[in-house]
Amino acid sequence: MTNLFDLVGSRAIVTGGTRGLGHGMAEGLMEAGASVVIFGSSDKVEKVAADFRARGFDCQGVKADLAKAEERKAGFEKAVALLGGLDIIINAAGIQRRYPSPDFPLEDWNDVIEVNLTAPFDLSQMAAREFLKKEHPYGKIVNIASMLSFFGGFTVPAYAASKGGVAQFSKALCNELACKGITVNCIAPGYMDTEMNTALTDPSNPRYKEITDRIPAHRWGTPDDMKGTAIFLSSHASDYLNGAVIPVDGGYLVK
C-alpha cells in the first residue's frame, strides 16, 4: 500500500517553491522521493534549491517571472530539461492585493489574474502537452485553489476571482485529460500562517479571532499541513481522482 504514495523516480515542477505553501509541498514531494525543480521570481530560488540539496534532496531552481508569458515558457522548458522529463506539476505561486472593492485598481486586478489564474492555466497546458508525449501518457497536475474558490472574502475581489477560476479551469481540463492518463486536481488551503496572510494573522485584527474561532482544529494551518495532500495528488494513490477541489482547512468550511 505504501508504494502507492512512493514518488521515487518522479520528476516535478513546483512554482512558488521558495517560501510558504509551495516550499512545504516541494519539500514533501522530495521527502517522498521525487526530483523537483522549484520556480521563484528572484535569485533567492538558487539559494533555496541549494539548501534543499545540502539536506540530500534532488532539487534545482529556475528563476522566472510568472507574470510574463515568455518567461513562463522558457522556465518550463528549462525545468523539463533539468529533470529529463516531467511527471508532476504543482502550480503554487500566487500574489495578493487588498483594497476595498469599489476602489480596487484595475492594474492590481490584472496583476493578480495574470499570476494566479493565467499562469497556472498556461503551465497546466504545457505540462499536459509534455505528458501526452509519453508512449503511455501519464501525469499529475495539481493546482492551488483557496477558501476563496468557495466564497468571496473581503477586500480581495481579484484573488477571489482568480481562485474561483483555478477551480473551474481545473475541472474543465479534467474532462478532456482524464481519459488520457492525466489527473487534474486542486488543493484549497484554509487560513494558513504564511507571509501572504500577515495582515490577517495580526492579533489586533478583529478578523484574526473571527477566523480562528471558526476553525474546528483551533489553529491556522502551516506549510507542513499541505504535504500529505500534495503527495497523494502527485502519486498513483490518486489515479482515479480527477477534478476534485480538496479543502485542507482544519474543518473551516464545515463549521
Image: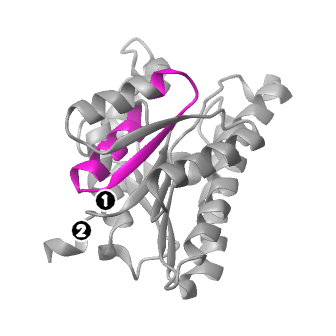
Instruction: Tell me if mark 2 has few (under 14), some (14-19) or many (20+) residues whose alpha carbon lies within 10 angstroms of its own.
Output: some
Residue 40, given in percent of the width and then of the height, sits at: 53, 32
Residue located farthest toward the left when viewing the structure as drawn: 1
Q: Earlier in the sequence, mark 2 or mark 1?
A: 2
User: In the shown orientation, is residue 183 left or right of residue 49?
Assistant: right
Q: Residues within 10 Å of mark 1 (few under 14, many from 20)?
A: many
29 and 255: which one is in front?
A: 29
Instruction: Magenta stretch: give its range.
Output: 20-45
Mark 2 and mark 1: Cα distance apart in space? 7 Å
Marks 2/1 in contact by CB < 8 Å: the verdict is yes
Quarter location, residue 47: top left
**Image position, residue 220 (x, y; %):** 31, 35
The residue pinned by badge 2 equals 5
Of 26 and 11, which appears nearest the observer?
11
Q: Amino acid at mark 1?
A: Ile
Q: Secondary structure at mark 2?
A: helix
What residue do we see at 51% from left, 48% from top? 146
As drawn, 50 above or below 161: above
Q: Residue furthest top?
A: 204
Q: Is residue 31 above or below residue 186?
A: above
- Residue 231 — which label? 1
Using the image, determine if residue 97 lies above or below residue 10. Answer: above
Q: Is residue 207 visible?
A: no
Name the residue at the bottom extreme.
179
Q: In the image, 68: left or right of 236?
A: right
Q: Is residue 53 left or right of residue 253?
A: left
Q: Can the viewer see residue 110?
A: yes
